Image: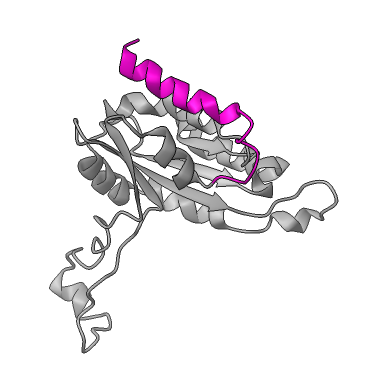
Amino acid sequence: MGTKELRGRDVWQDYSGANAGIAERGFYEVFDKHLVGSDFWIDAKPKEFKRIYVDQPLSDHVISQIYTPDEPIKNHGITPDYAIRNRVTGKTLYVEVKRQDGWVEGKPRSAGRGNAHERSCKYFTPGLLDVLHEESGIARPNLPFWTVFIGDITRDPCRVREITLWYGNHRNHFFMWRDLKNADPIVAHFETHLKQLLL
């Protein structure tokens, strides 16, 4: 392991120090600090997909059967929460952070009825996967995205099982960030399982 890699490792290990638990850290703040001095940087609300649906061609036959507004649609797409980018390779890992309630101690089972986790599955759709792979530079069979779950969903016995099944052999592409005051596990997960996809 080179000096740069060791220096980066020291940065994330420092999170477990006295200041790590003072306040809850958001995903962006954690990775913005972690990636300082490296070839990587974090981008909030990346814009490269904001028109992917606008630019989706339709046949004249389909167009004749749908509503066509007087004003052309200018923006219709997706905006991931974050992108972790490598300045050298140009590769990008897109990140969604999903907060959701869940069924935990003292709550009824219905507390787990949210659907943020289901909405995150759009990234698995064939057409969107094609677009993400092309833009990210991350080759198949790897996924070009990472979903981070926060909130009670991370301890919900039903939702955790659903998500685990959905990701199948790609379980490194989701993370249950159960303790937001402790950045060590999420940074270690990135370093161990995902960083190599950007090299």
**Vertical position of residue 89 compared to residue 120: above or below:** above
Q: Nearer the viewer, residue 47 or 27?
A: 27
Q: Could you say which quadrant of the image residue 2 lies in?
A: top left
Is residue 192 visible in the rendered structure shown here?
A: no
The image shows residue 177 at horizontal and vertical percentages of 59, 39
Residue farthest to the left, as pictured? 60
The image shows residue 6 at horizontal and vertical percentages of 39, 16
**Vertical position of residue 110 compared to residue 42: above or below:** below
Residue farthest to the front, as pictured? 18
The image shows residue 197 at horizontal and vertical percentages of 32, 28
Q: Nearer the viewer, residue 40 or 94?
A: 40
Q: Is residue 96 left or right of residue 157?
A: left
Q: Quadrant of the C terminus?
A: top left
Q: Quadrant of the N terminus?
A: top left
Q: Could you say which quadrant of the image residue 163 lies in?
A: top right
| Residue 23 in magenta stretch | yes
**Vertical position of residue 110 compared to residue 23: above or below:** below
How many numbered badges does the structure rendering display?
Answer: 0
x 31%, y 39%: residue: 41
Which residues are drawn in magenta?
A: 1-25
**Vertical position of residue 117 compared to residue 57: above or below:** above
The image shows residue 195 at horizontal and vertical percentages of 36, 27
| Residue 150 in magenta stretch | no
